[in-house]
Image (cartoon, rainbow, N blue to C red):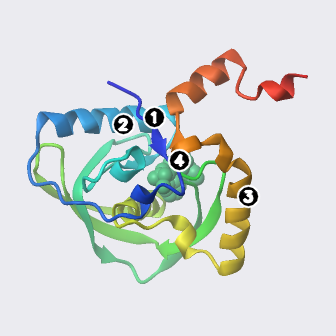
């Protein structure tokens, strides 16, 4: 399995709608495995295909108890009750904000074998599924913020965006730098 590079804010692929998957191939299975690997390595709870530069309508989610593969997912039911909660995004490192979303959702998708299933979710799982399905529609959590909060988030992002030349976040490299204690050499003075 491989750890893939993550595309960050500014990469046009994060704003493109994805293409439904029509055939479950060995290549798709490898992509799913690599996405789980990448998500766990980056310490995330979800990852969508566009975040690793792919256009398939595919996402993986793992809150720790039950890894989920969702191919061609759709929200088929949303609760009228809303909840506010903190969100982050592996494609917008170090930026967090409260987002209001339906508290519960029902999602329909295909699993990694192409079998259709429905999943009722609430709280953090519901939030994560909505965040990932938004990625598949070219939407980011920043889009839900007020102009004031989005402007502040973008200003903060601008300060660190130079760390990601070509809009690429090298997660595999980040971890080896952390382990060697060389992630910010200028701070060693
Ligand atoms: O899609 C992604 O960018 C992954 C993202 C998923 C997500 C986190 C929080 C709320 C909704 C969706 C992350 O995994 S960000 C990192 C993270 O583990 C986290 C951040 C805030 C709260 C809980 C977890
Ligand atoms: Zn995200």
Residue 40: image tag? 1
Q: Which residue is mark 2?
A: 36
- First in sequence: mark 4 or mark 1? 1
Residue 162 in the image: above or below residue 107: above
Instruction: Report the residue at 43% width, 67% height from top.
Output: 139
Query: Residue 88, percent across and down?
Result: 58, 55
Query: Residue 161, percent across and down?
Result: 65, 49
Can residue 118 be seen here? Answer: no
Q: Say which element carries label 2.
A: helix
Q: Which residue is mark 4?
A: 167
* Comparing labels 2 and 3, the label whose residue is closer to the camera: 3
Can residue 36 be seen here? Answer: yes
Give how far apart the Cα atoms at labels 4 and 1 are. 20 Å
Q: Say which element carries label 1.
A: helix
**In front: 3, or 67?**
3
Give how far apart the Cα atoms at labels 2 and 1 are. 6 Å
Marks 2 and 1 close (CB-CB < 8 Å): yes
Q: Which residue is mark 3?
A: 156
Give how far apart the Cα atoms at labels 2 and 3 are. 28 Å
Mark 2 Cβ inside 8 Å of ligand 1? no
Marks 4 and 3 close (CB-CB < 8 Å): no
Instruction: Report the residue at 46% width, 81% height from top.
Output: 81
């Amino acid at each position: 399995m491989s750890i893939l590079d993550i595309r960050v804010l500014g990469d046009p692929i994060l704003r493109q709608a994805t293409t439904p998957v029509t055939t479950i191939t060995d290549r798709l299975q490898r992509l799913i495995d690599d996405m789980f690997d990448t998500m766990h390595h980056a310490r995330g709870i979800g990852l969508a295909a566009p975040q690793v530069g792919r256009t398939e309508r595919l996402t993986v989610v793992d809150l720790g108890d039950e890894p989920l593969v969702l191919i061609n997912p759709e929200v088929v039911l949303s609760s009228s009750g809303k909840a506010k909660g903190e969100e982050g995004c592996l494609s917008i490192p170090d930026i967090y904000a409260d987002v209001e979303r339906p508290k519960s959702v029902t999602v329909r998708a295909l699993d990694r074998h192409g079998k259709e299933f429905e999943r009722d979710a609430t709280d953090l799982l519901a939030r994560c599924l909505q965040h990932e399905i938004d990625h598949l529609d070219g939407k980011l959590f920043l889009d839900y913020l007020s102009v004031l909060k989005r402007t502040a988030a973008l200003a903060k992002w601008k300060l660190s965006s130079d760390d990601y030349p070509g809009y690429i976040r090298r997660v595999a490299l980040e971890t080896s730098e952390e382990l060697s204690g060389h992630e910010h050499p200028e701070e060693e003075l």
